């Protein structure tokens, strides 16, 4: 029962460096999401995808890019990391429909120095 | 736009105490409502949900009732345990863009002492 798997779990970057976070789900879900979690602010949606080959912007998309080349994978990229992107990043997947239950990965803790 | 307001924490209770975490929302249409729980070092897990007015969601002794007239979805548990220590998030689901999206509250940290 893997569910939603995120890699890596921890990462430290220097300002200006780039990196890619990988999310993989084995539940055959159409929808996938990337969130960031900051103290006192809950989770905020960065980007999402409603199917293979599609992506869309969420609430806080600036500074991030995403790709969904395969249904089971959703990649989040930071082209030039900034200290403001220090956060915990969560990936989620879910089905379409009104109930929209989302299943979350364990998170990636990113620090940008 | 949509928003969710949660009772600020942290909340500290003794084991077997009664728990209430308040949640109110602002949304257009008829959103579905959720409580998610995040245990230390883990991702969020769905705790319970309600999809229409007057529905009661329940799981693991927790309950919440969808109150449209007061736009609320308060979480309650009659007798908390140490293992309930976690962060609790209230959320609503609504149609945004091309997909249903979740809007989260800021989270309430609960600590239960033995």
Image: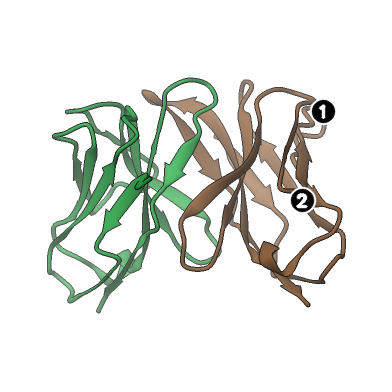
Q: Which chain is green?
A: A
Q: Nearer the viewer, residue A73 or B104?
A: A73
SS of the residue under disc 1 = loop
* The quadrant where residue B14 appears: bottom right
Q: What residue is shown with label 1?
A: B69
Please report, as a chain letter, where disc 2 is located: B
Q: Residues within 10 Å of mark 1 (few under 14, many from 20)?
A: few
Q: What residue is shown with label 2?
A: B22
Q: Earlier in the sequence, mark 1 or mark 2?
A: 2
* The quadrant where residue B12 appears: bottom right
Q: Residues within 10 Å of mark 2 (few under 14, many from 20)?
A: some
Q: Are marks 1 and 2 on the same chain?
A: yes
**Horizontal relation, residue A16 to residue B7: left or right:** left
- Report, in whole angstroms, how far the alpha carbon at label 1 lies from the one at label 2: 15 Å
Q: Quadrant of the C terminus of chain B?
A: bottom right
Q: Residue at 53% x, 68% y: name it.
A: B40
Residue A94: x and y in percent read 41, 33
Q: Colour of chain B?
A: brown
**Horizontal relation, residue A83 to residue A38: left or right:** left
């Amino acid at each position: 029962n893997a569910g939603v798997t995120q890699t890596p779990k921890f990462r430290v970057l220097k300002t200006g460096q780039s990196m890619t976070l990988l999310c993989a789900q084995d539940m055959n879900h159409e929808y996938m999401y990337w969130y960031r979690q900051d103290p006192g602010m809950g989770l905020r949606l960065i980007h999402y995808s409603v199917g293979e080959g599609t992506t869309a912007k969420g609430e806080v998309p600036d500074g991030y890019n995403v790709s969904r080349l395969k249904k089971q994978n959703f990649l989040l990229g930071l082209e030039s990391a900034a200290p403001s992107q220090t956060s915990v990043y969560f990936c989620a997947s879910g089905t379409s429909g009104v109930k929209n239950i989302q299943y979350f990965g364990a998170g990636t803790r990113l620090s940008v120095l | 736009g949509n928003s969710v307001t949660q009772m600020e924490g942290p909340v500290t209770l003794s084991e077997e105490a009664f728990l209430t975490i308040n949640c109110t929302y602002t949304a257009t249409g008829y959103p579905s409502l959720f409580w998610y729980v995040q245990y230390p070092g883990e991702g969020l897990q769905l705790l319970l949900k309600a999809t229409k007015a007057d529905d009661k969601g329940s799981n693991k002794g927790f309950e919440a009732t969808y109150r449209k007239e007061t736009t609320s979805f308060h979480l309650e548990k009659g007798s908390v345990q140490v293992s309930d220590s976690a962060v609790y998030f209230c959320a609503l689901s609504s149609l945004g863009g091309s997909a249903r999206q979740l809007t989260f509250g800021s989270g309430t940290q609960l600590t239960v002492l033995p």
